[in-house]
Image (spheres, rainbow, N blue to C red):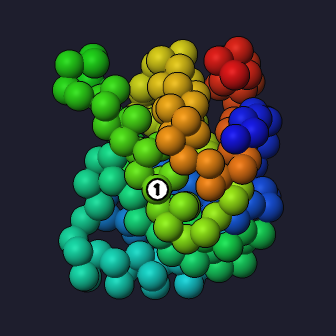
Amino acid sequence: MDLKAIKGDITTIEADAIVNVANASLMGGGGVDGAIHRAGGPEILEECKKIVAKQGKCKTGEAVVTTAGKLPSNYVIHTVGPVWKGGNKDEVQKLANCYKNSLALAVENNCKTIAFPNISTGVYDFPKDKAAEIAVKTMKMFSERNNTIEKVVFVCFDEENFNLTKNEL
């Protein structure tokens, strides 16, 4: 598995799948979530509504997949990141689950390339250094057991996340 960090806008990335940091309702929001919904168009929201009608809200650490609409990828994998509450509320495991469950859905949908944002490091306040460590460690562990995914790109929106992720790689 080729792991790479870039600074950029995830909505412009050509990959089989991009990962969206969604809220539990899957109805779009701010940050990465809002940007993906705006750029991808209404098809993404329509599929999210069907998923919620069928299974209810998406739990923290879980993931679901939809079309990518007008985005240059085939799929959007929506995962709900944990809100940092000091580290004693299973946040580390929940963040690792976001990556594991997103990768599992990518494999299930025959994806070879996937792009991730820095999950939970914005308004959810997860410490950026800890989040970068968890993300890279989870990718490496996954690639030891599964070689389906050929390339993972961490698309960092800010310089700090970019440098931390690059250093972990």
Q: Compared with residue 131, is residue 102 higher up or lower down, i.e. above or below?
A: below
Sort mark 1 into few (<14), some (14-19) or many (20+) by Cα contacts within 10 Å.
some
Q: Position of residue 38 (x, y in %)?
A: 63, 69
Classify the position of the N terminus by image quarter.
top right
Q: Position of residue 129 (x, y in %)?
A: 54, 16
Q: Compared with residue 77, is residue 147 higher up or lower down, i.e. above or below?
A: above
- Say which residue appears at 48% left-offset and 18% top-offset: 130
Q: Compared with residue 146, is residue 169 higher up or lower down, i.e. above or below?
A: above
Q: Is residue 124 visible?
A: yes
In this rendering, would 55 be left or right of 81? left
Q: How many marks?
A: 1
In this rendering, would 160 be left or right of 19? right
In this rendering, would 163 be left or right of 87? right
Q: Position of residue 136 (x, y in %)?
A: 58, 28
In front of the other: 75 or 28? 75
In front of the other: 121 or 151? 151
- Say which residue appears at 25% left-offset and 82% top-offset: 53
- Say which residue appears at 21% left-offset and 71% top-offset: 56
Q: Is residue 10 visible?
A: no
> Residue 6 falls in which quadrant of the image?
top right
- Say which residue appears at 29% left-offset and 47% top-offset: 60
Residue at disc 1, secondary structure = helix
Q: Compared with residue 136, is residue 78 higher up or lower down, i.e. above or below?
A: below
> Residue 47 falls in which quadrant of the image?
bottom left
Q: Position of residue 73 (x, y in %)?
A: 72, 68
Label 1 belongs to which residue?
Answer: 104
Classify the position of the C terminus by image quarter.
top right
Residue type at tag 1:
Ala
